[in-house]
Amino acid sequence: MSTTLPTAKRSSLLQFIPVMLCFFAMGFVDLVGTASNYVQKDLGLTDSQANLFPSLVFFWFLLFSVPTGMLMNRIGRKKTVLISLLVTTVSLIIPITGDGYYTMLASFSLLGIGNAIMQTSLNPLVTNLISGDKLASTLTFGQFVKAIASFLAPVIAAWAATTYLPTFGLGWRALFVIYAIVSVLSVSALAATPIEEERPDKVSGVKECLKLLGTPFILLCFLGIMCHVGIDVGTNTIAPKILMERLSLPLEDAGFATGVYFIFRTIGCFTGAFVLRYVSPRLFFAISAIMMGVACVLLFSASTLSMIYVGIALVGFGNSNIFSIIFSQALIASPKEKNEVSGLMIMGLFGGTVFPLAMGYASDFTGDQTGAIAIMCIPVVYLIYFITRIKKA
């Protein structure tokens, strides 16, 4: 009996794998939280100075997301993703040349630009492979793959910082070498993969894209994305600092807190990819948001390693499916403007600039991480409110 897959299924799988590899490359942006802690240690920076790195990365989402939506209308989604991967590769090569403050600023800026282009173009590219009713679960599976890269970043950095094996004098920055190699593989795989795209009926400008924010539900989704990424980047950055502050752990050990966050975000994405096929997005969203509310209470009061880990784990699991649910509902709400809506939603990742920067100043002001946790409660409260506005279907 032949075990050969039917041509259509084999073709779909050959398209799906390179796209998922691109989602893995999308996760490289999350190394900024781990990297900023190491740079802070190496250069003796304050919290507000160190938090400038993740804030700078996500600042570029404000400038590049909407123009990327317009670019997709002209050259297509696949070519736009390829451009993003090339920019990402360059950003990962720069730290190999040095670890100075301005060198890292340049690297993180290009990493942010590449990721802004990638997130804007890769998510709607998936709609060329997957039907609308399975879109949320497929995007969640993509976030699961992305989360694997995010989880591995602090593990690889800690290993490279402490290993006795040669890292060519790079130390923790060997992380950039490994991810640069994977980025090159992603470019090659996607470039060799044929994907048929629907052509847009019109070519929009910035004004037409921003005008969509006048639609109440699209605006709510935009703010929800801002809150999601603010929580994500903020937790990624402050989790090790909470352990260092309350338990006097060294950075190499406290860095595992970031790993805990991404382990549970990965588990949450994997779970959501299947559960969202059977459970309403509204119910799943409600459970997720309430988890993060409980986590905020724990992070304010916990003083033991286990309870701090529980709080971080609840944030990771709770925040894992927020993006996919909001993004898919925004695309479904405006099916004729997918590229434009994608640009607006990814522009919402600018929340990764606003909230971590505010958290850095708040922790400097209070002298500990309770100030940062208080700021993180703001987007959590908004997402709990958003439960009442999300579509039931």
Image (tube, rainbow, N blue to C red):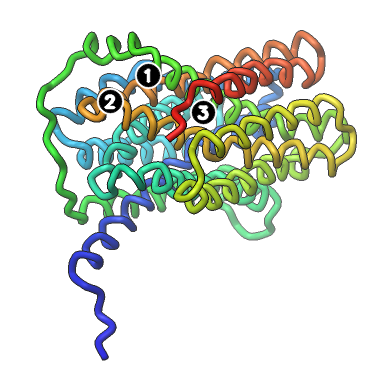
Residue bearing the label numbered 2: 334
> Residue at 48% of width from left, 17% of height from top?
223
Taking the view exactly as shown, the residue that stands out farthest to the front is 392
Q: Under tag 2, what secondary structure? A: loop
Image coordinates for residue 257, horizontal then vertical, percent? 72, 41
- Image quarter where the C terminus lies is top left
* Foreground pick, 302 / 217: 217
Mark 2 and mark 1 residues within 8 Å of each other at the beta carbon:
yes
Dot 2 or dot 1, earlier in sequence: 1
Q: Residue at x 73, y 35 (%)?
A: 240
Pinpoint residue 174: horizontal percent, then vertical percent. 55, 48
Horizontal and vertical percent position of residue 22: 36, 47
Using the rendered view, name the quadrant where residue 372 is placed: top right
Residue to which mark 1 is pinned: 218
139 or 355, nearer to the observer: 139
Say which amino acid is labelled 3: Met
Q: Could you tell which of marks 3 and 2 lies nearer the N-terminus?
A: 3
Q: Nearer the viewer, residue 25 or 133?
A: 133
Q: Is residue 133 left or right of residue 305?
A: left
Kindly report which numbered mark, 1 or 3, lies closer to the viewer in this rendering: 1
> In terms of secondary structure, where does tag 1 sit?
helix
Q: Is residue 341 visible?
A: yes
The single residue placed furthest to the bottom in the displayed view is 1
Q: Amino acid at mark 1?
A: Ile
Q: Quarter of the image for the N terminus: give it.
A: bottom left
Q: Secondary structure at mark 3?
A: helix
x 58%, y 29%: residue: 233
Pointer 3 residue: 104
Residue neighbourhood size for the residue with mark 2, other residues' Cα within 10 Å, grouped as few (<14), some (14–19), many (≥20): some
The CA span between labels 2 and 1 is 9 Å
Q: Dot 1 surroundings within 10 Å: few (below 14), some, or many (20 or more)?
A: many
